[in-house]
Image (tube, grey):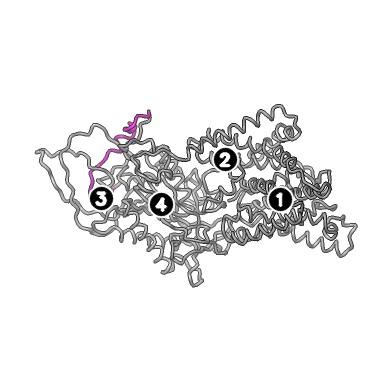
Amino acid sequence: MSVSAPSEAASSGAPSRAASRLPGLDGLRGLAVAWVLAFHLWPDLVRGGWLGVGLFFTLSGYLIAGLLDKEVTNTGRLRLGRFMARRVRRLLPAALVTIAATLALTALLDDQPLRTIGIDSLTAALNVFNWHASLDEAGYAVIFEAAPEPLAHFWSLAIEEQFYLVFPAAVALTRRPGRVVAAMAAIGLAGVWLWWGSTDAYVATPVRALEIAAGAGLAVAQARYGAVRRLFQPPADLPRSSRIAWAVLLAVAAALTVVSVLRLGPDEGLVFRGGPQLMALCWVVLVIAAVRDGWPARFMSWAPLRWLGLRSYAIYLFHWPVIELTEWHPVVVIVVTLGLAEASFHLLEMPVRRGTGRLAIPLLAAAAAVVVTVAAVAAAASTPERGIAERAEGADELPAWLAEQDQSGAAPAEDGTPGSVPESTAADLAPTTTAAAPSTTVERPSESPETLAGTTSSEISTSPTDTQPPAAESPPEDGIEDSETLPAAEPTVMDAESGFVEATDGDTGPVTTTSTTAPPQPETTFTVPIVTVLGDSAALYIADGLREWGSASRLMAVVDHSRIGCSPAGTAGSGWRYLRGNIDDEASPMGFLEDRACRDDFIQDGSDAVLVVDHGAVLFDHLSADGEWVSILDPALAADVADSYRRLVAKARGVGARVMFTTAPVLLPSYDRTTSDQPQTSPDRAEAYNMLLRGLVEEFNTAGVPQPVGLIDTAAVLDNYGYDGAFGRSDGMHLDYDRAEVFAAEVLGPAVLALLGLE
């Protein structure tokens, strides 16, 4: 989901054509910020509340262009320095305090926030956060599906600030506001064309410039053209035909606004194909209605809406960090946000603007110092330490704590002493004998996931695997080397619900291992495995939970390379590039990428395992090269998915990594729709995909293969839950972050370690 911000200019309340305030515009700002707030708190109910940002853009264009045009018309020039000083006094104090407070709270609530939040704070303070957000190839629509980003809402503030820098400078240089607006509109049209269909269209300044240009064009046209000025006249001064035409126009704009705010989700194709720019036409109509006399203006001048509008900038600034950094009830979030906005309005913003705040200036200086300091430290932290004996050349992808390992590969003890393992886990993690092709067994009672909460790795024992160095065994009585022939390894299938690893049918021949007499080892060390996670949006949540569990337990380092909306069939040259979306029947490019394949099967250098979590996109309809929608039940799509996995396994084996697949649970209907609206929820699709996985695992684990492929039956757990419960999927597809972390700790993490022989 996306984060939408109010226009700071719009929040300033500056009138475009007169010295007095226009109360209708204050109320219109109040409506817009209410949409945004409702969208972030109840995204399934107010799916199009993000459109409030477009209304703010248009309001900014109308107000700022009107001010500048009036000054140029009256004086023949523009005092650019004075304009910029007003903007700084209006916008900077609350923004800096928000950044500084968010940094402090994040540091208290998160033990490793510095790098991400530091870079976010720097780009937010420099007003380039939208371009920083565009670096996420999955698109900005993932904001609710990614790790908390309490400063992500600064993207639209960055666009506004860029407008405040460029537009007034251009007007001061040319003294032709109309031409500047025309150039801005041309840039906007070009931006829509260049970013057509790309998720970056949501945050790209040239694309969103068209919405600002709509408001600016209205202000300039109002000053120059009588036909436009007549639109602002009271209804009583217009002929009957004009009143009827205006009533129809307003009704259409209002109806489109209501329907769009309620139903147009930010992940629909129209959002990236000119939809917000078309809605700017509705915003122009609403601006006119708010300014001219009539019942719409009276409604938008309602005191509660005006109160919200006058504080819309502060409401926007504070509400998103409160949502991201707390788990409060929406009503509590609203109360706290409004309280902070009221305090900011009276104690910080207004005193600074009037030059009367004794407390505000020191507070502002302190906030600026915090931002600069943390940004500098974040820049230094952006290049992490090397360590872990250079196991991973791409160590920048790995958690910082992993770099604390010494060259021997031993995890540091809790007291910080390198080369040792905490006593509570040392015995559980002792290395075992190596076999060329291991047979992995989990001796664990069958329990429901809820009873696994307190289970530790000591309750799991594993026979020799290929992932550990040889260790001492009890010598034979005669002290002579003893050789024995063991059964060959069979494909291993982990049932995540019962905790048992089952072997599939198939005889792959004998494997010989040798045990020798060896002296006792003085110390046992444990090398932390690196696990690369691949998959779709379901993998994103699970990878986050696995990373949190692995970091807290120091048992696993996780590198997430999942991509939202990416099917395993979406590889280069496959021909499968579009999915039928979860919300509507529009074709959406896989991974929201128009120009290239979404699945590149990136494997972190030094990875010990590759965990594949394809629980969503693979079950959706895929658009074939012939233009037909088919599913995983179609032989052609199933074959391409299988070929994709074959290439992945070959690539992983080439770097010594072990692949582990996870079975997909049946998807549940989401967004209050029925199963008939969402064919991806058919149990037949999940069953077909899981059968394909089982067949592939049996195929992969032939005689003499390195790194046997594992299959973890996650569906056996997740299918037991609906939308609620310990592992419920509230939207029908994804575990939320809290449930994903528990799922990692109780089910998936132990299963991965067991398959690696590290239980």
Residue at image location 82% in from the left, 50% down from the top: 73
* Residue 550 x, y percent position in the rendering: 41, 41
Residue 465 is labelled as none
Which residue carries the number 3 mark?
Answer: 438
Q: Secondary structure at mark 1?
A: helix
Q: CA distance from mark 2 to mark 4?
A: 40 Å
Which residue carries the number 1 mark?
Answer: 170
Which residue carries the number 4 mark?
Answer: 714
Residue 490 visible in rendering = yes
The numbered mark, 1 or 2, whose residue comes first in the sequence reads 2
Viewer-nearest residue: 61 or 664? 61
Q: CA distance from mark 4 to mark 3?
A: 22 Å
* Residue 439 x, y percent position in the rendering: 26, 50
Q: CA distance from mark 1 to mark 2?
A: 27 Å
Q: Which residues are magenta?
A: 415-440
Left or right, 297 with reference to 393: right
Viewer-nearest residue: 222 or 290? 222
The numbered mark, 1 or 3, whose residue comes first in the sequence reads 1
Viewer-nearest residue: 704 or 173? 173
Residue at image location 85% in from the left, 61% down from the top: 243
Q: CA distance from mark 1 to mark 3?
A: 70 Å
The numbered mark, 2 or 4, whose residue comes first in the sequence reads 2
The kind of residue on which mark 2 rests is Leu
Residue 305: quarter of image: top right
- Please name the predominant secondary structure of the magenta segment in the image: loop
Quadrant of the drawing holding the C terminus: top left
* Residue 476 x, y percent position in the rendering: 13, 39
The kind of residue on which mark 3 rests is Pro
The kind of residue on which mark 4 rests is Thr
